[in-house]
Amino acid sequence: MTDATTLSPSPAGAAPDIGPKSETLPASEAAPAPASDPYAFEPEDYGASVLRTTIFCLVFLLLLPFFASLPAMIGMRAAAGVLGDNIGLLVLAAAFTALMFLVFVEMMFSIRTRVHLGREKVRMTLPAGRGPTPMLRYRSYEFPYDQVDTVETRREIYGGAMTPVLMKGARVILKDGTLVPLGYVSEADADPVFPYDEIARKIADRARLPLIDRGAVRRSVRSKMMGIKATDSENTIIDDAGIARLNASHNTFMLALIGIVLILMLIGIVQDFADGSPIGQTAVLQTVPAAIS
């Protein structure tokens, strides 16, 4: 005989209680829905492109054999007593040395400079030299965003009416007083390799701080490159009207220079017409007839 299992009848209108059971948690123990953090930023990296780094490395390696041969060439001419040719070679060597130094500086800048803006902290390797041109010394920084006290930018004006240069500098000051200079970028450069003002703004956003603009000041190129501390007169803030006057004087200077060049060209053309010679001809080849013996 087969035993039959008796099922308890279900309430009228209810579905039968069969199948797997889902455990229902109380409302207080339910997992909270993920909330979107408005201050969550994705990591970003700044660095020189592979193409830029490769070009500077190739240029340096191609010029290096010629540069290394200059001392031997100068020594051979000095030993032979050829002083006239040696003077020109010394001038060439000085210009070549300056060129090689600039190429080497840019090559090291492309290889070593890096900025990583993480979710919680910043890691950077930046030039430690003073001035708008990166030197050969580098320094690494690593600090969390909650240790940032202020993020500042400032415009520095170099030169005068002839060749004014506007540089935008940025720096980070930590809560323990550590000063982290980011660097300088020319305002005339539309696509800089390291946009330090943009990096400063993103660091301020991640640290939930306002970006402080310290205005514009006049600085001396010699003092900046020599590491001389700025005087009180150099730290005087220049307003937008002063910058506008400087740009206007620069435009006036350039127009005057172009006008002088045009006047000199006009004088040369008038002189050619007065002499009856074709325009642009500066010398006439004259043939001397051979003497009749």
Image: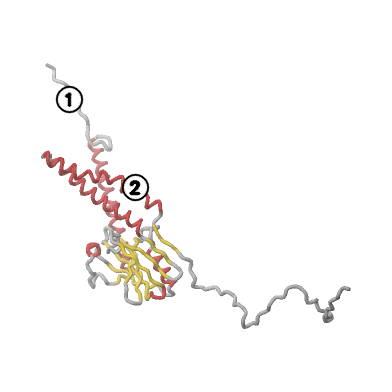
Q: Which residue is farthest right?
A: 1
- Residue 230 lies, with reference to residue 278, above or below; the image says below
- Residue shown at the point (37%, 58%) measured from the top left: 189
Q: Mark 1: which secondary structure?
A: loop
Among the 4 quarters of the image, the one containing residue 221: bottom left
> Marks 2 and 1, Cα distance to the nearest angstrom?
54 Å
Furthest toward the top, the residue is: 293
The part of the image, by quadrant, that contains residue 265 is top left
> Is 31 or 108 nearer to us in this picture?
31
**Which residue is pictured at 24% across the width and 62% down the height?**
225
Give the image location of residue 282, x and y in percent: 23, 36
Neighbour tally class for label 2: few under 14, some 14-19, many 20 plus, Cα within 10 Å: few
Q: Quadrant of the N terminus?
A: bottom right
Q: Disc 1 marks which amino acid?
A: Val
The numbered dot on residue 288 is 1
Q: Look at the picture and state if 192 lies above or below 79.
A: below
- Quick check: 121 left or right of 218? right
Q: How many marks?
A: 2
Residue type for callout 2: Leu
Q: Residue beneath label 2, please? A: 58
Location of residue 158 in the rendering, given as x and y in whole percent from the top left corner: 27, 63
Sequence-first disc among 2 and 1 = 2
